[in-house]
Image (cartoon, rainbow, N blue to C red):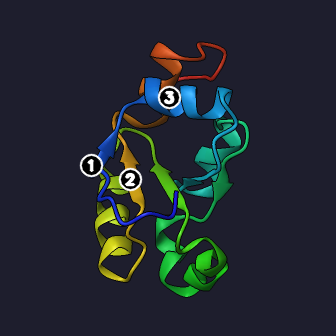
Amino acid sequence: MTDNTELPLEVDVQTVAKMQQSADSFVLLDVREKQEYDTARIDGSRLIPMSELRERIQELEDCREQRIVVHCHHGMRSLQVTQAMRQTGFSQTQSMAGGIDQWSIEIDDAIPRY
């Protein structure tokens, strides 16, 4: 998505699942720590822990104009990251409400809850 329409700050897991199924072009950014990612992950997600994002933000530079959906465990870290990314020009960034925990409940119960 490269238009100037402002997206809502959060997006629900059902919408993200539909985006994946329809092969929409977006980045699914996981901002949890590596050990959390090793415990449970959503296929296709890209791990850059919140604790490393400041040093690694350039890895997302080629995605600046793309839609980026950020997720964490329950949605708090991803909301912080989304707000910070929007302030630095990543205007198409959204937080996945409820995080991977909500994803496990509503979309894929094979993903372990922790």
Query: Is any part of residue 62 visible from this angle?
Result: yes
Residue 93 in the image: above or below residue 114: below
Please tell me the numbered disc located at residue 70: none
Q: In which quadrant of the rendered view does residue 5 lie?
A: bottom left
Please give the label number shown on residue 114. Answer: 3
**Earlier sequence position, callout 2 versus callout 1:** 1
Task: Quote the CA–CA distance across marks 2 and 1.
Answer: 7 Å
At 65% from the left and 49% from the top, the residue drawn is: 25
Q: Amino acid at mark 3?
A: Tyr
Identify the residue shown where x is 33% and y is 72%: 86
Is residue 31 visible to us here?
no
User: Dot 2 surroundings within 10 Å: few (below 14), some, or many (20 or more)?
Assistant: many
**Residue 16 relative to residue 41: left or right:** left
The three-letter code of the residue at mark 2 reads Gln
Residue under label 2: 94
Q: Residues within 10 Å of mark 1 (few under 14, many from 20)?
A: few
Q: Nearer the viewer, mark 1 or mark 3?
A: 1
| Coordinates of residue 50 in the picture (x, y in percent) | 47, 66
Q: Is residue 103 above or below residue 97?
A: above
Q: Which mark is residue 8?
A: 1
- The vertical placement of 112 against 88, above or below, is above
Query: Which amino acid, mark 1?
Result: Pro
Q: Tell me if label 2 and label 1 are in contact, CB under 8 Å.
A: yes
Q: Position of residue 64 (x, y in %)?
A: 53, 75
Distance between the Cα atoms at labels 1 and 3?
28 Å
